[in-house]
Amino acid sequence: MAWKSSDGETEASHLVGQLETLIKGMLNTENLPDLIRHFIVFEKSKKEDPKSGIITIQTVKKLAAYHQYYAVNRAVESTLRATGYISSMDVDADALPGGIMTDGTITGGTMEPPENYSLAGVKQQPVGDRKGGVVWHTQGSGKSLSMVFFTGKIVLVLDNPTILVITDRNDLDDQLFDTFAACKQLLRQDPIQAQNRNHIKELLKVASGGVVFTTIQKFQPEEGNVYEQLSNRKNIIVIADEAHRTQYGFKAKTIDEKDEHGNITGKKIVYGFAKYMRDALPNATYLGFTGTPIEKTDVNTPVVFGNYVDIYDISQAVEDGATVKIYYESRLAKIALSEKGKKLVAELDRELEIEDLAETQKAKAKWTQLEALIGSEDRIRQVAEDIVIHFGQRQEVIKGKGMIVAMSRRIAADLYDEIIKIRPEWHSDDLKMGVIKVVMTSASSDGPKIAKHHTTKEQRRALAERMKDPEDELQLVIVRDMWLTGFDVPPLHTMYIDKAMKGHTLMQAIARVNRVYKDKPAGLVVDYLGIASDLKEALSFYSDSGGKGDPAILQEQAVVLMLEKLEIVSQMYHGFPYNQYFTADTSMKLSIILAAQEHILGLEDGKKRYIDEVTALSRAFSIAIPHENAMDVKEEVSFFQAVKARLVKFDSTGTGKTDEELETTIRQVIDKALVSDQVIDIFDAAGIKKPDISILSEDFLLEVQGMEHKNIALEVLKKLLNDEIKARIKKNLVEGRTLMEMLEDSIKRYHNKVITAAEVIEELIELSKEIKRIDKEPKEMGLSEYEYAFYTAIADNESARELMQKDTLRELAVVLFEKVKQNASIDWTIKENVRAKLRVIVKRTLRQYGYPPDMQALATETVLKQAELIADEMTKGE
């Protein structure tokens, strides 16, 4: 990701070069030391090979992006203001990390000030109000790591503070704890996870220090409505994940009081957990992080946390490439839900808006009815069949993972059974095997059908690792509540929703598919229940709250883009009857692809334009699939991709790597008639016979010269010569460089229309013959190929060739090769003392043989560079 701001206040203009912005914004004398010290973490991940059982540990270095850097510094500044700590400090600026001044200001600031969104910011808040503010960074933009960076920095600034990280779900607590535990070097201590209510009391009744994790529910008093005070220290910082949730409020409500058997014995008043936390930690400062904006009607969040500290919304994240767009596809037409079911969904939605579902007996009854309708045997079978077909079509064009969100544990288990009836090979009882898994917990009362899918914390961690691994066979998971927030699987490209969700919950769930992965073009949310109106509501609340950018886009928009790109590509075939391809037999298809390739190469800058446009078409197609309009043009896209694949084969500037090696997730739509077990090489692509011995044989060159398609003949020769010369450069620096210059000169003159295709082919054939002639020279001179490489290095200047006889240069080359070999030790290329010694030996030897003095320094460097190329040969026998 580019560094987008030079001052931390505004985004740099597109007219200003990226390098200039990087130097001014990131590499200045204040920000660079701050970044190095406080914004780099090393995360270790463990991966076990399911076959061998071998465990590999991988370490990844992560550096904060520009939006994380500025947000964290702003949050530190706001926290110092909220604690009242900065005003009482009597220290110089150097004692504070990262340019925080003694007046509480920080050099640099927020990327997008809340004022830009017409929203209140923390600057209006008084000193010592204990409200650190809210950081709104859209899901997928690195919120968890921002919390780590903040914690690592604040523990240095405050007087050994206690950091309390709270969430409202156990699985979220685990996920966030794992992230912090992996970054303990930056925190300078091991984070601790509270196991129960007594444990949290122990951890907070300390004089100082500690990074503690807990769920907010542990602050429920055992009796009454007042929680005991645990500490009155001011240097306690509470960081709340997803700070907008109702659990963080003060509001009182009446609930049923039950005995140990679950029987209602009366009513009691309970308060929001924010009230109990204030009882326990009256002087703590609260900082909230959220992936979705605070609703304008939400009074709790500003009361607990204060105003916005920093905003990084969807439009910025997508533009920066921090996340990808999310598209929405409704499959309601495919899966029928009865009118009664639709009515129940609507009624349940209204009830959910009023009160918490778990405490509404009326809503519970409706939920049970709806669960029975959605989970009916016939409907589950339909959903299973549709998911298997839909996901299969998606996997054909974009490699990755999928997630199914079910309404209940029973439905999740039934759906799993139906899917493995269709695809029995996907099932495995082994946790480390299988294409599909259910991720949930179960109680003993749930029965054996659900209980067999129960997973422990460790088992879920193992499944998470499998899901994140793109090479693992696990491709689909069925969840109910787990993994819908805070769970990162970059290869996840499709989410199937068969559960009623609203507002923040819905937006957080769909954000699971917005993670960046290789060239994944977008995520897709598939709706089986009719969440479109809820999505619209979530979108309007998002924009009403100041958010820019669409959280989800209708799949039809991707279809429109795909059809636009299809039109552009098909126009490049103007005058070429490619429609014959679709009714042709296999041999005829290959001939048409060959002729299509010749046609594209004959266009002005045709090759580059075509490859770029077909790549864009493939991206749009992979988002649109399996929309019926995309399925209609699948064969046409397949033809365009087949021609592109042939053109890429000839690309001498490329690496000739496969799609997997090129870090791509987008797959080519394969024409089954053209499938072969072997990789189609460039000779097949050009329609010529592969030479038996050498690509530079007379017969082969004559065949190329006589080819009907001159543009393809040129591409073949250019590619082959380029590969040949590159192979020579690895052994013989000077010779390879000279030949590459000759090749590039001929191609340049052809592109500048100085010579025709036929003429450039003649020149390249002459170059081929020159390579053959050079290949014979070492043998004629009685030199090995390595000695000859040293000979070309010292004979590479005119004055040496004029002053010295060829035999003398030959003898000098042999002596130099032997002396360098004798004095080169293991790793000599990276040991400066050995290199310096070799430099002296080469110079002395050149002087002894009367090498021109003015050229000795250049020749010495060339000889050493040549020796580096064949370093392994140099140290053989060591």
Image (cartoon, rainbow, N blue to C red):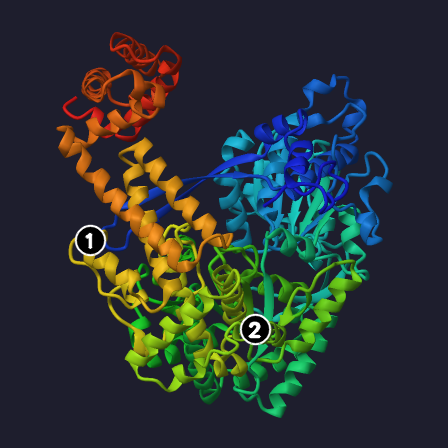
Residue found 25% across the figure and 57% down from its top:
701
Q: Is residue 155 above or below residue 14?
A: above
Visible residue check, residue 158: no
Identify the mark at residue 697; answer none if there is no mark. Answer: 1
Q: Position of residue 851 (x, y in %)?
A: 30, 13
Taking the image as shown, residue 396 lies to the left or right of residue 680, namely right
Visible residue check, residue 642 = yes
Quarter of the picture containing the C terminus is: top left
Question: Which sits in the foreground, 491 or 731?
Answer: 731
The residue carrying mark 2 is 562
Mark 1 touching mark 2, by CB under 8 A? Answer: no
Q: Which dot, 1 or 2, sits closer to the camera?
A: 1
Q: What kind of residue is marked 2?
A: Met
- Give the quarter of the image for residue 366: bottom right
Q: Position of residue 650 (x, y in %)?
A: 37, 57
Q: In the visual, does 171 lie left or right of 667?
A: right
Residues 857 and 612: in front is: 857
Distance of mark 1 from mark 2, alpha carbons? 46 Å
Residue 230 screen position, x and y as percent:
66, 38
Q: Residues within 10 Å of mark 2 (few under 14, many from 20)?
A: many
**Residue drawn 30% across the image and 52% down it:** 765
Tell me residue 388's x, y (percent). Answer: 41, 78
